Image (cartoon, grey):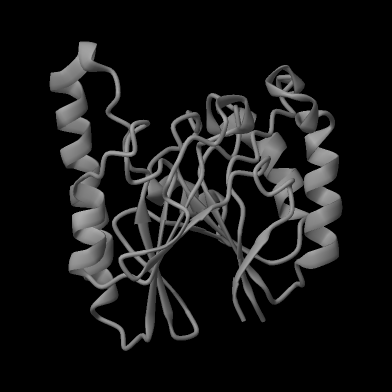
Amino acid sequence: MALFAIADLHLSFFNPKPMDIFGEIWKDHPKKIKQNWQNIIKKDDTVLIPGDISWAKNLTEFAHDMEFIRKLNGKKIFLCGNHDYWWDSVSKMNSLYTEIVFLKNNCYIYKNIAVCGCKGWCSDNSNFEEQNEKLLKRECLRLETSLKDSLKYNVDKIIVMMHFPPANNKNEKSCFIDIIKKYNANCVVYGHLHGCDGFNTDLLGIIDGIEYVLVSSDYLNFIPKKLAD
């Protein structure tokens, strides 16, 4: 058994969206995902998928991408990304996909590790300052709720998964990092950033005792990143 992570699958089997407009690396990316995944991930492994799983607009469209995901090895832990418009109420998704864990205001326990998280928010657009502040506070509350849920368990390590990095595109820290430190989280995995933007982040490696890991699929060359045994 092992724990892996990979974000930003950007699947679109219902209404195909060519991803190679974002770089040659995206050419035939579902094939790359499948080949690497099946070569590395075993049936008893667990994979964190921190958002932008599918371009689908609703659960009906998402069913086509879910068929692809279902055939991949391992247990999957989903987190909502900014492009996951198909994401519905957790109760509805749980009724459709009992084999998937949907992370929202809760935590998932893997061995002695608590996996917590929230989508996060990138508040870079000053034209929507009031809306940004509201969404930032909402996501910080969701992160704290998830981390509080982990207190019910006796764990040795906390991994936080987010879709957005816990800082803006100027690498200015946010309330997310304050909360992550408050609950003594050990590791943060995040996606959202892509090569077409130059993977603009300084949040890599160990900073103030916390390990930051970027797991965008193109950053990983579509190879799931191992986090723990």
Q: Quadrant of residue 103?
A: bottom left
Residue 93, x across and y down, in percent = 48, 47
Q: Is residue 40 above or below residue 221?
A: below
- If the image is split into quadrants, where does the C terminus sit? bottom right
| Residue placed most toward the observer, 22 or 65 | 22
What residue sits 50% from the left and 84% below the top?
Answer: 111
Q: Is residue 29 above or below residue 34?
A: above
Residue 34, x across and y down, in percent = 82, 49
What residue sits 22% from the left and 32% below the top?
Answer: 135
What residue sits 13% from the left and 21% below the top?
Answer: 130
Q: Is residue 129 above or below residue 190?
A: above
| Residue placed most toward the observer, 84 or 33 | 33
Residue 12, x across and y down, in percent = 69, 28
Residue 87, x across and y down, in percent = 46, 37
What residue sits 21% from the left and 26% below the top?
Answer: 132
- If the image is split into quadrants, where does the N terminus sit? bottom right
Q: Is residue 21 above or below residue 135?
A: above
Q: Quadrant of residue 14?
A: top right
